[in-house]
Image (tube, rainbow, N blue to C red):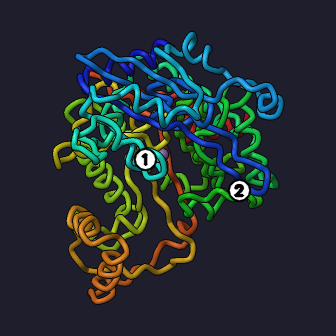
Amino acid sequence: MQIFKKNRDHLAKTISDGVIIMHGGVIKYRNADTWYPFRQDSNFHYLTGWPEPDAHAVITIENGNHQMFLFVLDKNEEMETWDGKRIGIKGAEEEFGATRAYPAQQFKDTVVEIIGDKFENIYIDYSSPLFTELDQEYLRKISRYPQRGAEFSNANLHSLLPVISEMRLIKKEEEISLLTKACEITSKGHMKAMSLAKPGLYEYQVAAELEKVFFDLGSERLGYPSIVAGGDNACTLHYSTNRDLLEEESLLLIDAGAEYNMYSADVTRTFPVSGKFSPPQAAIYNEVLKAQELGISLVKEESTVKEIHTKTIESISKSLIDLKLVPMGIEDTIGMMHYFEFFMHGTGHWLGLDVHDAGSVEENGVSRKLKKGMVTTIEPGIYVRPYKPVVEFPLLERDPTLIKERRDKIGIEEASKIEEREIKEAKKISHKIPEELLGIGVRIEDDILCTDDTPVNLTESAVKEIQDIEELCNS
Ligand SMILES: [Mn+2]
């Protein structure tokens, strides 16, 4: 439980005076009397370590010292007979370091007693549904403004999530070791998939074998639904039905990650179902690998998130020209965003408790510099959609920064319509896609720890050189 105490120490240093009020996750019903397996809210876990549903936490911070009050499901023989053992009030105090714990039902009244009129700065999760349902009920009773006949509060409300997000962005040693473990397990699962996939199996059969490796090695659940996408399905970015048959001569793209002690890995490998890359498949594969290795080498202090993406796009754009997938030279391929036809997602994202982890990619309005302890994925791809043998490329300068600004300003619905119209009205150049490349989708993704020295690839053990992949596929 040391790590959660450490996180609270860190929080107390950041805030120094104030109160944090947080709500844990709740059970979500799937259909009728059946529920989704419970997983604790990541922020709640980060500060408390509490694994059960329906809990609340109040953390008071005075002069940099903190106390934690937990509100948890109390012991109850009848309920435990149905739903499993509860840690209870005593356990919350003795094992989880709560200064005091109370039954969850006492939250509303007790939170007022704990906070009283002592604190003026209250940190709340505005995004929680309980903010409107529950918090607003008692908040006016805290830090009261003493006006006769009135009940309202002096308290300043602050948004809690940005504070925690900034903390979660830099991983502590304990977190890095959990992530490392999640990454090792995940790499082993991917290697297993390479060695057993063959034509005639269904995608879900490969998923089952890979996930079995995760669970056998101590993972309690997946970080996200596995994408096991054979052939053309690789061009559907979030494909996850996994119901198709694996075909001879096709590639299999697998994007899957184990969660270990709440930390998730995120790995993608693409390999030939029959064990041998065809020349066009190898051509695309090696170009993606080149961009990915470049991206990985840039995960170091002083690089910004934007630089990494820009350089990866440059590399992919050059490759697209070499592969004859785009009609123009390098400047226009980038300036007119022609690369976007084949590489339409970001180069990476933060990784941690959430697979798309907390933390902004900007700091004070500019692209954030990487720092020691950040973990990001690097995952370029090239996807040649099978149903677009001819692509009409607009001859129109497009700046992703301006596009994003407009999207932020007027909303994605309206902005995307304007973009569509601009593209529609622009002159086009019609380009025939080399037939042998149609339907090939390749993504390669690793999890990279930024250090004050060279980047550390936490998923390096999952092979990705063509020769190593072919060897494993045929073993
Ligand atoms: Mn990813």
Q: Quick one: which residue is furthest to the top in this view?
A: 94
Give the number of the disc on residue 463: none
Q: Residue at x 51, y 33 (%)?
A: 107
Hey, what amino acid is under mark 1? Glu
Q: Residue at x 46, y 14 (%)?
A: 99
Hey, what amino acid is under mark 2? Asn
Q: Is residue 417 above or below residue 301?
A: below
Q: Quadrant of the C terminus?
A: top right
User: Callout 2: helix, strand or loop?
Assistant: loop
Of residue 259 and residue 150, the one placed in the foreground of this image is: 150
Image position of 475 (left or right of 279): right
The quarter of the displayed image where residue 125 is located? top left
Image position of 423 (left or right of 357): left
Give the number of the disc on residue 137: 1
* Image location of residue 282, percent across then percent down: 53, 52
Q: Is residue 43 above or below residue 326?
A: above
Name the residue carrying label 2: 242
Cβ atoms at labels 1 and 2 below 8 Å apart: no
Q: Is residue 335 visible?
A: no
Q: Is residue 325 above or below residue 158?
A: below
Q: Is residue 363 visible?
A: yes
